[in-house]
Image (cartoon, helix red, strand yellow):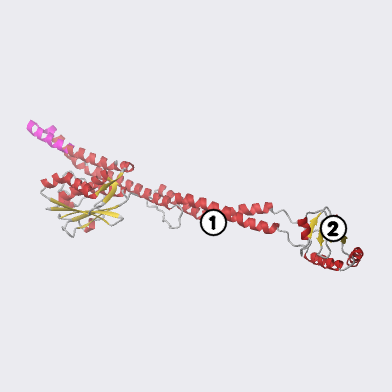
Amino acid sequence: MRKLYIYLLTSALVSIVVLGWLIDIFSEQTLETDNHFGWQSTLAGGAAKQVARQAPAQRTNYIETLRTDYELEISYKKGDTLAVPSELKAQMLTNNGLVLEDQQGFYLLKTNQELLPDYLELRLEKPPEQKDSDALLTLLFYAGVCTFMWFILSPLAKRLSILSDAAKQFAGGNFSARIATDKFTYIKDVELTFNRMASQIEKLLAENKLLASSLSHDIRTPVACLRFGLDAALDEGDITKVHNLLTRMEKDLDQMEDMLASYLSFATLEQKSHLLKFEQASANEYFPALIEQVAPKFQSAKIRIDHEIEPSLSIHADLHWLARAVTNLLSNAADFANLTVLVRVKGDGQNIHINIEDDGPGIAPQNWHKVFSPFFQEQSHRNRAQKSYGLGLAIVAKVVDWHHGKAMVSHSEILGGAKFTLILPCKAQ
């Protein structure tokens, strides 16, 4: 938005300055004294030369002759009759002469060096009056400003219209509505924010729908077991068998509690996204500490965990939630690895790559795009990890999305099993 504010302010200032400058030039040219009396000045100059050749006593009679013969309103004046500043008197020597105005109209004063201090006065016909152009110039100025601002703001209005249409489509139920960004747009940040918001809302709606569907499906089994156990306990007369049935029902209730707790925890996870606290940490200290946290599980499963961390690498992230994502991947690797898990962390200048690989059965390539979806579990993996509801990798994907990164799964070329890769920006966006 700062780009938009700067652009609008700059456009307004430039339009005012440029249009003001152009109108000033036009006004100056309009207000300059145009030589409406060119031929009269030439005539008066020639007459002044002829009069200067006459004897001083004959000059008045000569002018009267010219006045009569040529029907000119011209007269011979003595220099002491002219009460004007010396600067104006000097203009009488120029080619255009000195043009003055009185109640009758305009008159031209002309002389030369031989005729000084006397001069000739030629009455002129008053030229057509020019209309006052101030109102016109003002109108042109504001019209120019409006035109210039329209030229600048019309692309903005177009992009806002596109944004409005996308918002209406989204509000109408088309959750795939997005804005195709343009590099020349002034509100690129707003458009990207809208697209990100729309993607998050679409993802939340899909997750909520999936959550309701999965919960209604998965909870049927323990509920059915509870119903069967309760009916059997009511019909059973042997107290020992009743006790065994109640013990089994208690396990079913524990499973339901774990399931509901996991589902509710995932459903409320998005509410914590605005509480992220980004911090700087050394990768050589951060990741070994996370490995140490899950070491008991690896020791219990007799699995070796190795790590390769690029020296002097620094990470900038919410350390708590990144730890949650990494430990989920490590715990998942411990569940499926046979003997070895490898953690590799490296940077490329712009992003940090966190790779967690194992030598387990891996994930089928056709499921690579599904593994980060909530509640997804491969059929061959469902019984490997107890109390697993397919939410661990979904949490990983959500945390990475909070960091504007990317989570991927592929085949490990080193260990032959699954390879999970987290790509995070070096700096928070």
- 331 relative to 64 in the view: left or right: left
Secondary structure of the residue carrying numbered label 1 = helix
Q: Is residue 240 magenta?
A: yes
Residue at mark 2: 79
Most foreground residue, 378 or 199: 199
Secondary structure of the residue carrying numbered label 2 = helix
Residue at mark 1: 151
Q: Hey, what amino acid is under mark 2?
A: Gly
Q: Is residue 203 magenta?
A: no
CA gap between label 2 and label 1 equals 61 Å
Point 32% across, 46% down: residue:
204
Q: Nearer the viewer, mark 2 or mark 1?
A: 2
Q: Position of residue 285 (x, y in %)?
A: 21, 47
Up/down of 32 relative to 383, above or below: below
Sooner in the amino-acid sequence: mark 2 or mark 1: 2
- 191 relative to 289 in the view: left or right: right
- 251 relative to 63 in the view: left or right: left
Mark seen at residue 40: none
Near mark 1 (Cα within 10 A), the count class, few <14, some 14-19 or many ≥20, is few
Question: Which stretch did the figure color magenta?
Answer: 233-253
Q: Position of residue 4 (x, y in %)?
A: 47, 51
Q: Hey, what amino acid is under mark 1?
A: Phe
Most foreground residue, 183 or 113: 113
The image quadrant of residue 127 is: bottom right
Q: Are marks 2 and 1 in contact (CB under 8 Å)?
A: no
